[in-house]
Image: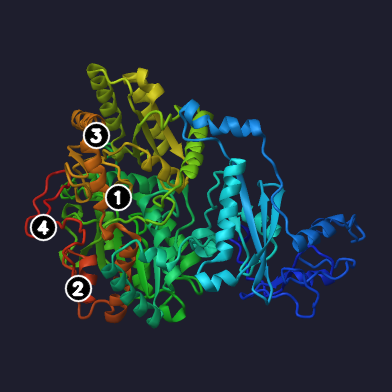
Amino acid sequence: MSEQDQPLQREEPAARLYRAAFPDDATSYLCLTAEPGPILASKALSTRTDSGLPIPPPLKEPTRHNDECPSELNAGQSGRPKSLRPFILSIMAFKNGRKFSKSTSAHRKRRLSSAAETEGQFGPALTRLYLGISAAFSNDQTALIALAINDGIYLTDFSVKHLDLSDNQRSGRDVIADYVLKEAKDYQHEKFAKFIGAGLPATLARADSMVRKCVMYFGPSQAPLLQVGFRGLVQTDVGFRAYLTTVQNYKDTCGASTWETMMTYAEKLRCDKTRIAFFSSTPQGGGVALMRHALVRFAHRIGVDLSWYVPKPLPTALRITKNIHNILQGVSPPSQRITAEEKKAVIHWITENAYRYWLSESGPLRPAEEGGAHIIIIDDPQMPGLIPLIKRFTPDRPVVYRSHIQIRSDLIAKDSSAQADVWEFLWSNIQLADMYISHPIPAFIPHTVPRAKVAYMPATTDWLDGLNKPLRDWDVGYYGNMYNASCHAQKMTELHWPSRKYIIQIARFDPSKGIPTAIDSYAEFRRQCKVVGIEDTPQLVLCGNQSVDDPDSSIVYDQTLDQIISLCPELMKDISVMCLVPNDQLLNTLISKAHVVLQLSTSEGFEVKVSEALHAGRPVVATKTGGLPLQIKDSVNGFLVDPGDWRAVASHLMDLFTNEALYERMSYAARTGVSDEVGTVSNALCWFYLASKWRDLGTEKSGTAVIQPNERWVYDMAREEANCPYSADEEQLPRCSIEDKKTNGEGSSHLS
């Protein structure tokens, strides 16, 4: 790869003066530096308006700075402004204030207001807008707030408001935040619009500039663009420019014991300046990516040095690693094998990335004394090839391997099986790791893994991100329309909620997700509805995001449509099958407004979509496979069925659609029974504990591992170490019985 193909490294510019598009002396009226801190009007200006803000001095010929193009000053080739009118109007607005002026057609407002009632859709289609925010502060408790609105191309409207800040101190309120939020909400409802994002500088000024820059961070799907920087460093939240959460927000998502335990280990990591590095194959798409974005965001917020790296993608290697994934789960064709050449290709791909990006100077795999990480976590079956490299260069550095899929250990135990061959290849690298972390199901652990090295940790989700945060009805309407617009563009069935309820399964189009069972179940359910005379029948939604490292999705998508067309073509108008672009709030809308959620996987680890559905108060019908029985209490917050048992699924759907009391009872149990253990704070607690423990004790001494979890839950170990026992009212996931690990061929375990 040539040098120009590598991601650019850009240094942050030094602090410099940013100026609004006013003539030279007038810029002292509204200016700021790139350094944080309050913005004060120039003390040299003594003449003030009634609000206390300085009046700009007479206009002079503008000075154009290096970072400003002539178009920004509305100037010709001479550098002179074509007209002073824009400057005069701007200054008058800042002096006297200005309200939003763009009007909306009364006829359009009437049509959109009645759209939900007359058409049975989520809500009216909304115009997508972006918001820029700026402020200038004076010394007498007043502020000048400017809001600029952009449609993605041009500035379309703006307002200027003088605010009295004295109420801030008297009432403890944030006057500026209250004003901005109210103005944005009112504008949305008045203009039938949806703000996609808002931009503001580190110190507030230049609203128009900020809204133009804000637009640049959003992609075609109106989701923030994924940022992967130099060395494959995943830069969550557009390089941490988007501030989505506060520490208090996270504290409110968990119990006091969980928070205090987590902070104990976080403080230790900060004091020791411990660096933690995660490695996985893709920055988006699957459950691993969702957890890592949340963990990196949280660690950054509380000051823990935690980074996440991904390799440069190679399509041929990703096809091989997907085959490995399918074989381990037992969902591949019986004849499929991984050849010696394919194994070499995967190792070469990882090794090349390691030497080029991670073992080079200042890379994360360099020794800790050279700036590398103190603790390494390998987060994927695609990445074990890194472990021998790490141990060769830094044998004393702890390496933790995490297995995030259901592994058919019963098939691995058969010497001639494809699973045994693939596992032998992976284990030759994984065995060098200091700890093996699995989903909390003993049957997922192949017999070759020493039990002393094994620890359990469930998959988690973030209650504050777009997948789970509460959405207002206005936003639900926007994202519901977004889904239907995508369906319309692809000639796919649209949803008619709220006039019709719907059943949903959200999962990747993957052979292990049980999509054929979902279709068979729905077809049988519709037949039963016809028999008993139910006319208000629900729709079925089968959708999911496509993962970068999953080439199977288009194949399974086609198989899904083929099944519907061949077996139940009359239901095609009621089934919506969509492969979606990544958009968390869209998935949130679909889950939170569904009547029932399905998870009918034939192989599954610990499915976070089940946790998210329960958190939203949706009863879940799922299979007795993998970690799903840990999440669902049968007949309490959902139902558990055998894999492939579509008749049982149809029967439970009938119960949930015809017995309102049963539905309400299950919905309440789902909403109130979610454990702290499946949230981001608990996930951080587990990783922080392991990092601090390994940093303290180091790796093997005299051939014996210093930390021997012996199949315990990391969460339990961390709570015990911090002397923070469980209280009687804490929700806990069921623990797998260590004494009784009898398993069936599908990998289910007895629970206690």
Q: Is residue 195 positioned above or below 305 on the image?
A: above
For residue 660, the mark is 3
Q: Amino acid at mark 4?
A: Ser
Classify residue 492 as left or right of residue 651: right
The Cα–Cα distance between marks 4 and 2, rounded to whole angstroms, is 19 Å
Quarter of image, res 210: bottom right
Closest to the camera, between mark 1 and mark 3, is 3
> Where is residue 551 drawn, in percent x and y?
42, 41
Q: Is residue 376 positioned above or below 457 on the image?
A: below
How many circles with numbers are drawn on the protein?
A: 4
The Cα–Cα distance between marks 1 and 4, rounded to whole angstroms, is 22 Å
The Cα–Cα distance between marks 4 and 3, rounded to whole angstroms, is 36 Å
Classify residue 591 as left or right of residue 598: right
Tag 2 residue: 720
The Cα–Cα distance between marks 2 and 1, rounded to whole angstroms, is 25 Å
Tag 4 residue: 737
Closest to the camera, between mark 1 and mark 4, is 1
Which of the two discs, 4 and 3, labels the residue nearer the N terminus?
3
Dot 4 falls on a residue whose secondary structure is loop
> Where is residue 373 drawn, in percent x and y?
41, 73
The Cα–Cα distance between marks 1 and 3, rounded to whole angstroms, is 23 Å
Tag 1 residue: 611
State which quarter of the image contains the C terminus.
bottom left
Closest to the camera, between mark 4 and mark 3, is 3
Residue name at image x 69 percent, y 50 percent? 100
Which of the two discs, 1 and 4, labels the residue nearer the N terminus?
1
